[in-house]
Image: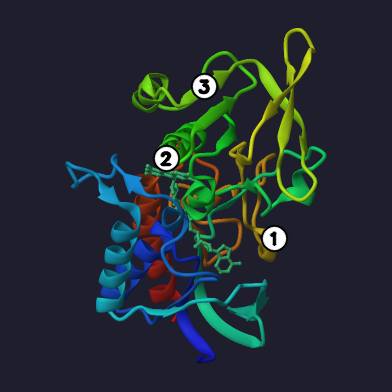
Amino acid sequence: MGKFYEAIIMGGGPAGLTAGIYLRRAGIETLLVEKGIVGGTPMNYEHVENYPGFPEGVSSKELMNRIADQARRFGLVIKEFIEIEEVSRRGKRFLIKAGEEEIECLGIIVATGTESMKIGIPGENELVGRGISYCATCDGAFFRNLDVAVIGGGDAAIQEGLALANIARKVYVIHRRDTLKAQKIIQERAFQNSRMEFLWNKTPVEIKGKDQVESITIKDTKTGELSEVKVDGVFIYVGARPRTAFLGDLVDRDGAGFVITDEELGSKTEGLFIAGDVRRKGLRQIATAVGDGALAAVSCERFILEHR
Ligand SMILES: Cc1cc2nc3c(=O)[nH]c(=O)nc-3n(C[C@H](O)[C@H](O)[C@H](O)COP(=O)(O)OP(=O)(O)OC[C@H]3O[C@@H](n4cnc5c(N)ncnc54)[C@H](O)[C@@H]3O)c2cc1C
């Protein structure tokens, strides 16, 4: 890996890749560093039907591969399986530590997205990978004709519950309220699906199993009554936490840890721009991540041209 790039993009999801397209088309020497495979969160689910330009919907992997190909065509250098560990100032430049590597740059775009939150109940840590999962696309196939529970009531929970209903025998949706937060169109599909059963006003209190998940204990949020549901798998979608630890105090965060930006997607540190799900914003979707990537890139380009 070279020692200096004008711009470094951290994270290869929709926001980071779009920033790469814009920076490279502006002629900025840019490296994108991704800790896994390029494509971001959409590589973990199947289908997208609300991204403009695809009337029939599109495979989320195909969409991301096409965006990555477009970025590469303009000369974006992409390094996969390298995790950014620390960012600091070195004079007018930034110094980035990633494994054994140290790289310097003038401008940074942070597009590192979010990671799934745990519920924090007994059995969760012990049974991860042994029936507990945070990704139906990755692990759903292990539950063919078995019974599973999905925890949560937002878009991710219901969308993934629907995907699981194509594989599993039964999908229990365990939700602490009596209405869902998910988009109406997804809710309607779930209510019509005979394999999905909704357990309203329930919170999980323990996941049990010797070597594999065997059951989940749930508590009624109104009466406090405990009951046990026999399941082979538990899929958890209770929210997401932004990945920003490597930024230290270079940025300001809100109470939930999302990075606070100005209108040009700048942070409190000059030259450090933020795009996508990792920042405080009203809607976390591919369309908004792509928009952020474009704006952060143009802001970063302006900064670099002034400080070259
Ligand atoms: C189950 C599910 C279904 C969804 N369905 C839809 C949908 O139908 N339509 C829609 O528009 N949106 C959907 N979304 C939301 C959408 O996926 C996100 O809004 C979008 O991916 C955000 O893009 P991003 O680039 O900000 O972050 P991400 O896509 O999360 O990409 C961030 C990247 O940064 C990398 N990274 C993190 N830390 C580091 C580090 N330290 N060093 C290097 N790389 C790092 C990660 O590995 C990741 O690849 C869904 C989300 C989920 C969870």
Residue at numbered disc 2: 163
Residue at numbered disc 1: 245
CA distance separating discs 3 and 2: 14 Å
Image location of residue 259, percent across then percent down: 60, 50
Q: In this view, does 237 lie above or below 59?
A: above
* Amino acid type, mark 2: Ala
Q: How packed is label 2: few (under 14 Cα within 10 Å), some, or many (20 or more)?
A: some
* Amino acid type, mark 1: Ala
Q: Nearer the viewer, residue 225 or 3?
A: 225
Residue at numbered disc 3: 197
Nearer the observer, disc 1 or disc 2? 2
Q: Are the residues at dot 1 and dot 2 in contact (C-beta closer than 8 Å)?
A: no
Q: Which residue is drawn at 36% across and 69% down?
A: 20
Disc on the earlier residue, 3 or 2: 2
Q: Is residue 205 left or right of residue 21?
A: right
CA distance separating discs 1 and 3: 38 Å
Q: Is residue 108 above or below residue 209?
A: below
Q: Are the residues at dot 3 and dot 2 in contact (C-beta closer than 8 Å)?
A: no
In this view, which residue lies farthest toward the bottom?
A: 2
* Amino acid type, mark 3: Glu
Query: Does residue 238 appear anywhere in the picture?
Result: yes
Disc on the earlier residue, 1 or 2: 2
